[in-house]
Amino acid sequence: MKAATAEINTTALRNNIDTIKKYVPGSKIVAVVKANAYGHGLYQVASALYEKVDAFAVARLDEALNLREQGIKKPIILLEGFFNEEDLPFIARSEIYTAVHDMEQLEAIERAKVEKPLHCWLKIDIGMHRLGADPQDVMKMKERLEECPNVLKPIGLISHLSVADTPAETEYNIAQINYFRETAKHFSGDLCLSNSAGILAWPDSHTSWVRPGIIMYGISPFDDKVGADFGLEPVMSLKSSVIAIRKVKKGAKVGYGAAWTAPYDTTIGIVATGYGDGYPRVAPNGTPVLINGRYVPTAGHVCMDMLFVDLGIDSQDKIGDEAILWGKGLPVEKIAKMCGTIPYELVCRVMPRVRVELI
């Protein structure tokens, strides 16, 4: 009998890359593995995809160095660039690619003492207003990077679509793509624009490199779709076990705060997963859990280590039976929607105590 376990299906992961390539047959693939590969395991995902993709992308330098230390030799891109000037020698020595999104980073590169030139991608703001060079600075920054002996040439151009997953913002999305395309005319280096939603829904955003993130893991970036709608398979299945079964009478008040009252005589199952494992406490009564091939509803507040499910009065379920919280047979998108969040957050929040099993 197992407590919370994240089963990671590496075959599904590789199949998803094959599916993604059908959407972007002319592009190189940058696999986004930041935030512990969206909760799926940084090195585990990178090693499983090593022969399938052209590069990896992370948010922080320690993620990139972790991959290098474990033998990942393909290009690794720092999507946020570097935070500290003193990190530049490590970045250069490890041949890590870095985004350059503001004048402060540019000036640090110009001052740097490095053993070899840096791989740089100029990051421009096309409408997210998060990171990226402003339109009035783009060409000036490009010229300085091209003149800097610390930078390999030609430099790349990278940006991020902010509304590719929002159908109502069609006009704004087209404007972002067009601005990137116009700017790209001045660059001879690599181009990288499409994120997951761009890959699936916006062919005009496809460039020489694309960055699949959430879709690699079999999860849809769109509110009204699940991964299966695009031929994707869930990579993570969060599983646990039924560890206790209780008969309760109609009117029984269940759990902390008496948050659920039995509307009939029924059987309650206790599943060994809670918010201490990353399952959301905000999951409302009725959130489905897959047990023995059927959806059963949660009943009462999620506890730190356990949650309640209503198995029904005629339940034949037993202690030790497997419970799937999300994954194969139960899309994480469905759970996220019931919890008022996005599936990205749920898979990223799986806690360290959850056992990881690769299959």
Image (tube, rainbow, N blue to C red):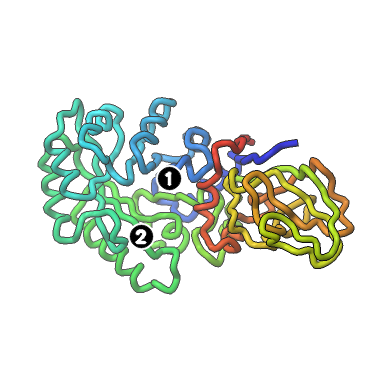
Query: How many numbered discs?
Result: 2
Q: Position of residue 351 (x, y in %)?
A: 55, 41
Residue farthest front in this picture: 257
SS class of the residue under badge 2?
A: loop
Mark 1 neighbour class, 10 Å CA radius: few under 14, some 14 to 19, many 20 or more:
many
The residue nearer to you, when weighing 87 against 274, is 274
Q: Which amino acid is tagged 2?
A: Leu
Residue 329, compared with residue 147, is above or below; it is below
Q: Position of residue 66 (x, y in %)?
A: 40, 30
Left or right: residue 62 versus residue 237 is left
Mark 2 and mark 1 residues within 8 Å of each other at the beta carbon: no
- For the N terminus, which image quadrant? top right
SS class of the residue under badge 1?
A: strand
Residue position marked by numbered label 1 in the rendering: 32
Q: Quadrant of residue 148?
A: top left
- For the C terminus, which image quadrant? top right
Q: Which amino acid is tagged 1?
A: Val
Q: Position of residue 303 (x, y in %)?
A: 65, 49
Q: Residue at x 52, y 43 (%)?
A: 39
Q: Quadrant of residue 207?
A: bottom left
CA distance for labels 2 and 1: 15 Å
Q: Which mark is residue 267?
A: none
Q: Residue at x 45, y 59 (%)?
A: 197
Residue 112, compared with residue 81, is above or below; it is above
The residue nearer to you, when weighing 192 against 203, is 192
Q: Residue at x 57, y 56 (%)?
A: 227
Q: Quadrant of residue 30?
A: top left
Q: Which mark is residue 161?
A: 2
Left or right: residue 301 versus residue 138 is right
Mark 2 neighbour class, 10 Å CA radius: few under 14, some 14 to 19, many 20 or more:
many
Q: Position of residue 314 (x, y in %)?
A: 89, 58
Which one is earlier in the sequence, the residue at label 2 or at label 1?
1
